[in-house]
Image (cartoon, helix red, strand yellow):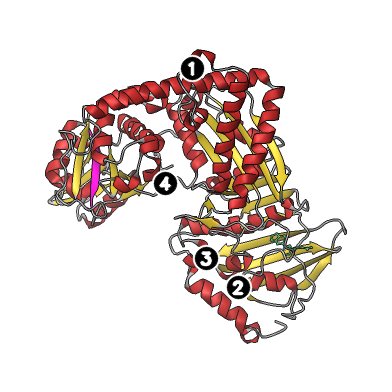
Amino acid sequence: MSKDYQASNINVLKGLEAVRKRPAMYIGDVGSRGLHHLVNEVVDNSIDESLGGYNDIVMVSINKDGSITIEDRGRGIPIDIHPIEKVSALEVVMTILHAGGKFDKDSYKVSGGLHGVGVSVVNALSEWLVVEVKRDGKKYSQEYRRGIPQYDVKEIGFVNKKDTGTKVTFMPDAEIFTASTKFKFSTLAERMRELAYLNKNISISIKDEIEGDDETFHFKGGIIEFVKYLDENKTVFHSPVYIEGEKDNVPVEIAFEYSDAYSDNIFAYVNNINTHEGGTHLSGFKTALTRTFNSYAAKNNLIKGNKKVTLTGDDFREGLTAVISVKVAEPQFEGQTKTKLGNSEVRSIVEMLVGEKLSEYLEENPAIGKKIIEKCARAAEAREAARKARDLVRRKNVLDSMHLPGKLADCSISDPEHTEIYIVEGDSAGGSAKMGRDRRFQAILPLKGKILNVEKAKLTKILENTEIKSMIAAIGAGIGLEFNAEKARYGKIIIMTDADVDGSHIRTLILTFLYRYMKELVETGRIYIAQPPLYKIKKGKEEKYAYDDDERDKILLRFQGSSTEANTNPDSNLPKGVTISRYKGLGEMNPDQLWDTTMNPETRTVLQVNVENAIAADKIFDTLMGDAVEPRRAFIEKNAKYANIDI
Ligand code: 0RA
């Protein structure tokens, strides 16, 4: 060691200590999400290099020892001595909070939400980290332990002058990530795929040396291909419309197309971050879309036959799949999850660009224009019919939460913060649940048989379905555009179905409905899946429940260990005196058992449904519920056992 770093730079140590003391403040949490965020943080820096036109390749590798490497061909982190800190700029970037960004101001460095905290945060949360930089014909490196440099930046060789880039390898610190430090290929790959769609000039490869997985993402068509990918399993009306432009230093890129789906599917990005909560770029787009299409339709007399209906924004969004990608130098992120763009200037920029370019596009592609207008006019007619149907239903008071469905066993507390509703498959399981529950805060709604597949049905049909109506009434917060999560009568919505193929299908149907018509509940993490046990294992008076095969085997081993006699039953592998029963359905459990194993908040496990990856969620629902048969078969075969829709 050339210098005693442990004592030399008190500011660095203070910064590292702050990060290690409150890691969640910097990376959101110390669970799986935070762990994978470390990788994204480094990759974001590589992508930033590509935004400036300096980088075309990012390579991510999960290494055999569990560490991870991110390598790019950017300019390489500068290594010259930093004028203020008096050490290599590389060391500054790696050890000083918020020094990681470009020093130049006109880059679109991501700086909101959890992004852009800097590589120094990754360094502070790594047991060890090695950085290698190729720059000016030389190769340099430095190593750190929990963020502390182990030696000065050193030269380790020569390279071709044109050969530049940065390579970061790190081992996440198990002292910080106490649950697990294992990187998941699919989680990382989904984000890499998204980044490759959003940045068409870059090729991103990822490999997993442990599991042997390997993928490379490079989409020359960028977001046009992204839109096609999102609609892969849908029937589309035309090839994507593509709009590109820049105003006041804000580059805007939009691709969209219409399919025969009933809902819309818009992904809006700012500096490669998915702005789940929307914002000014999204509202600018929506306004321009409605206005431009309406004036095009009027000018070309395209809604002659439908004089009575006026087309609204909703009509122009039915079946719309769109990707909006803008770059903003100083984005303001607002909203609950800091994923809503606040910059007001962006609204008019997007609105103007879309207005201008879409008009041009429609003049040049009249056939497509006509098709879209006709499609949206049909949507308007259907909307009108649906409104009538809804009014009818409303008049009958079915959707009114004052009239709760007869099958609902409500709870006595009314504060949603403390209440939960179990949506249960079948009347008999519903009966057990009603008897087993804690009636103060647990409500039970049994559903009979399969509910309607909302992915394939029009709103009018959906509103006629008894099971769906009772869910809407019980939850009490409306549906679709009128949905208001604040009115929801329960804090948790727990889906409880049998652990078999039918149960899995019913669960997917319910989830599809909630995802399409009460999305906010999914987005705010209020939907859960109950986990009933698969086995009951008995030895004498002792009873144990197992929730999967591994757990069953562990319990059996334990019983075997405590058994003094050898197994004398030649027909089974079971220890003596032990019996196993496999639960075929919830109905086989008596109320007490159901409470003990699945409903008691003290002892149960429930899976929270989250849409961490909205793209994956959308695809799963399309695949499982849409028209196309082949992809569904492929999905089910690939996810054999029973597809666990933990999206
Ligand atoms: C600071 C300044 C510059 C580039 C970077 C950091 C940089 C960071 C990372 C992290 C992973 N890959 C990276 N590539 C670059 C600007 C360099 C210049 O002005 O020459």
Tags 2 and 1 touching, CB below 8 Å:
no
Residue extent of the magenta highlight: 419-425
Q: Name the mark nearer the viewer: 4 or 3.
A: 4
Residue at disc 3, CB closer than 8 Å to ligand 1? no
Q: In the drawing, does residue 208 fall left or right of residue 72?
A: left
Q: Is residue 602 shown to the viewer in this render?
A: yes
Tags 4 and 1 touching, CB below 8 Å:
no
- Between the residue at mark 4 and the residue at mark 3, the CA separation in whole angstroms equals 22 Å
- Between the residue at mark 4 and the residue at mark 1, the CA separation in whole angstroms equals 38 Å
Is residue 434 shown above or below 60?
A: above
Amino acid carrying mark 4 in the image: Glu
Seen at 54% across and 56% down, the residue is 333
Residue behind mark 4: 523
Residue behind mark 2: 147
Amino acid carrying mark 1 in the image: Lys
- Between the residue at mark 2 and the residue at mark 3, the CA separation in whole angstroms equals 15 Å
Is residue 155 shown above or below 350?
A: below
Q: Does the magenta stretch include residue 188?
A: no
Rendered location of residue 11, percent (x, y): 61, 81
Q: In which quarter of the image is the C terminus?
A: top left
Tell me the number on the disc at residue 307. Answer: 1
Rendered location of residue 273, percent (x, y): 58, 50
Q: What element carries label 3?
A: helix
Q: Tell me which label, 4 or 1, sits earlier in the chain.
A: 1
Q: Tell me which label, 2 or 4, sits earlier in the chain.
A: 2
Amino acid carrying mark 2 in the image: Gly
Q: Name the mark nearer the viewer: 4 or 1.
A: 1
Q: Tell me which label, 2 or 3, sits earlier in the chain.
A: 3
Tell me the number on the disc at residue 26. Answer: 3
Q: What element carries label 1?
A: loop
Q: Quadrant of the N terminus?
A: bottom right
Q: In which quarter of the image is residue 457?
A: top left
